[in-house]
Image (cartoon, helix red, strand yellow):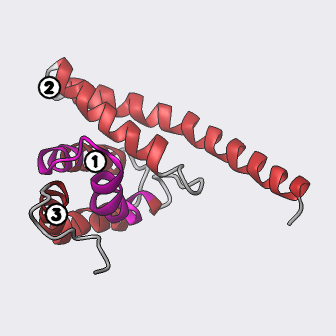
Amino acid sequence: MDFEEYEFNYKDYEQKCNEIRMKNEIYLEEFEKDLTKSGLKENTIKSHLNNVNFYINNFLLREEAADMVTGTGAFYLNNFLGIFIIRKCMWSTPATIKSNVASIKKFYKSMFEKGHIREENYNGLLYTIKEDMNTWLDDCEAYNDSSLPNPFSPF
């Protein structure tokens, strides 16, 4: 692959990411309205929005232009909460994982109710959370405790 071809592919990637970010802005606005209607406090709403924004506008766009609508958002949840948050975010604790799970569940429920995602994608997300939550929490705790074996170490 020569430089011009690489540059062209990168431009396509950036354009796709910008298109996804514009759609995500609308989804986040809809989500904020739902959270406000539910009577949550402003700080709680802000926390949910920050968590979801980080997931859909940072993590999902990090390696490819993945959007939350096509099902990839639910598909990548395990990589996000089970690996990325734990290993790459120095603020990760079991409590931050729980907070992100709560935010993402609320967001995807809102998106499902508005018809933005299919039922099977929403149910898949819930299933992933149910099946993997304890592993994420245990791995995060072990990773942050130097006296315990590193769950990500190959040895």
Residue at which label 1 appears? 104
* Mark 2, secondary structure of its residue: loop
Magenta segment: 73-100
The extreme top residue here reads 42
The residue at which mark 3 appears reads as: 133
Q: Alpha-carbon distance for marks 1 and 3?
A: 13 Å
Name which of mark 3 and mark 2 comes first in the sequence.
2
Q: In the rendering, at what x and y percent does residue 66 appear?
A: 54, 55
Mark 1 or 2, closer to the camera? 1
Residue at 23% from the left image edge and 46% from the top image edge: 92
What's the CA distance linking mark 1 and mark 2? 16 Å
Q: Residue at x 49, y 31 (%)?
A: 25
Residue in the picture at 23% in, 63% down: 126
Tell me the quarter of the image containing the N terminus.
bottom right
Secondary-structure class at tag 1: helix
- Give, as a three-letter code, the residue at label 3: Met
Q: Mark 1: which amino acid? A: Ile
Q: Does 68 appear above or below 123?
A: above
The residue at which mark 2 appears reads as: 40
Q: Nearer the viewer, mark 3 or mark 2?
A: 3
Ranked by sequence position, the earlier of labels 1 and 2 is 2
- Structural crowding at the residue carrying mark 2, measured as other residues with C-alpha within 10 Å and reported as few (<14), some (14–19) or many (≥20): few
Residue 119: image location, x then y, percent: 34, 63
Element assignment for label 3: helix
